[in-house]
Amino acid sequence: MFETLPQPKLDGIIAMMQAFAEDPRMGKIDLGVGVYRDEAGRTPVLQAVKAAERRCVETQESKSYLSLAGDQAFLDTMETLLLGGAVPSARVAAVGTPGGTSAVRQICELIRSARPEAVVWVSAQTWPNHAPLIAASGLEMRPYRYLDSDKGGLDHMGLFADLEQVAAGDVVLLHGCCHNPTGVDLSAQDWAEIAALLERRGAVPFIDMAYQGFGEGLDADAGGLRHLAARLPEVLVAASCSKNFGLYRERVGLAMAIVPEAVRANLAGALAGLNRKVFAFPPDHGGRVVSTILGDTALRTLWQNELEEMRLRVAQNRQALAQALQAETNSDRFASVATQRGMFSLLPLSSDQVAQLRAEHGIYMLGDGRANLAGLNDFSIPVCAQAIAKVLR
Ligand code: LMR
């Protein structure tokens, strides 16, 4: 039966995780997978998570099934975290999913069951797993211009020219904040212009929110989503708690449809039905940890402080790397690293230069130059800057 099964092409991020783990060199530097690391290179369990887990273990009396949507407290507290009351709950249908990845997939399945001919528009540079997830749902995907690689900022003209091609009923996938891989975020003005354009064209935004709290802060990072939700009749959301709660391997996410009140119950049923067909009930533990933290003033304060510490560390790494690169290369080529947001920047390097960094210096980043700046520390910043300057010579 399986003799002719084609070998799957390994996802670039997963392949790099494996290659890094197998590299025996002591001084290797991991700027690969999007995982937060502290100054010592660790990804510790957050203290707020530890405390919430202890509370859950002590108080939970049953692990019997809940509904197909999962724990209602998780969905309610996440609705507030994401939407901040921008729309009435009567417009919101949401289900838990195993991580943000499944949330993206379930939203694609929802789009396909409602409108199989819808095109999903995706920024030309995007998370490498978006295309496979969209294709696996049988939807057509088209790129819109996003990055102006000369200035390391938004290609505003290109983005709006391409979005003018969007048809009524098409879907536009946007990164809520901390654009992966470019680190280039939309301003409040850009979000307002996008909302007006989508409204005029009758297209539906789909927000992938995987890094809330890592850009400007929890509320600021959700500003674009909240603006769209308040203005447009339909908004789709895939959210992840992997990064901001450090719950990576617990797989905590949710798929949300913000719709007119009259169809909310239909959407809730459709999302629950889609869950039933793949994993039935979403995992509970991580979501319960999240709702325990968000529902308790002391735990929430502890978590927000921990998240803020992570956000500021990554922002400081940005500044320090940009400065070190300026000094080593004697150019402003990397200046935008300092102004971008979130864990990633797309360093302006060729694939050969990226390969050379890995082979000769043990520095791992994605082939297109995507670097996770959380993987840097005071010791590795000058090492990386010197190595990058060397491969550029
Ligand atoms: C990343 O982009 O590195 C992370 O979101 C991890 C993943 O699942 O790809």
Image (tube, rainbow, N blue to C red):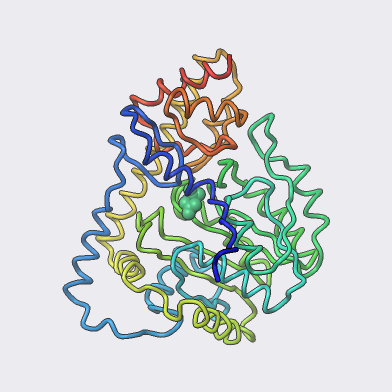
Q: Hey, which quadrant is residue 317 in on the image?
A: top left
Label total for image: 0
Residue 9 position, x and y percent, is: 57, 52
Q: Would you say residue 84 is visible in this rendering? A: yes
Dividing the picture into quadrants, the one containing residue 332 is: top right
Q: Position of residue 120 (x, y in %)?
A: 71, 62
Q: To which quarter of the image does residue 155 belong?
A: top right
Quarter of the picture holding the C terminus: top right
Residue 76 location, x and y as percent?
A: 42, 74
Examine the rendered structure and indicate whether residue 157 appears above or below residue 235. above
Classify 134 as above or below 183.
below
Residue at image location 30% in from the left, 85% down from the top? 64
Where residue 215 appears, as percent x and y from the top left, is 48, 46
273 vs 140, left or right, is left
Residue 47 relative to residue 389: left or right: left
Residue 228 sits above or below residue 268 on the image: above
Residue at x 28%, y 66% (from the top left corner): 296
The image quadrant where one finds the N terminus is bottom right
Q: Is residue 211 visible?
A: no
Left or right: 61, with 158 as reference point:
left
Residue at left offset 82%, top offset 55%: 164
Q: Which residue of the protein is positioned furthest toward the left in this rendering?
A: 58
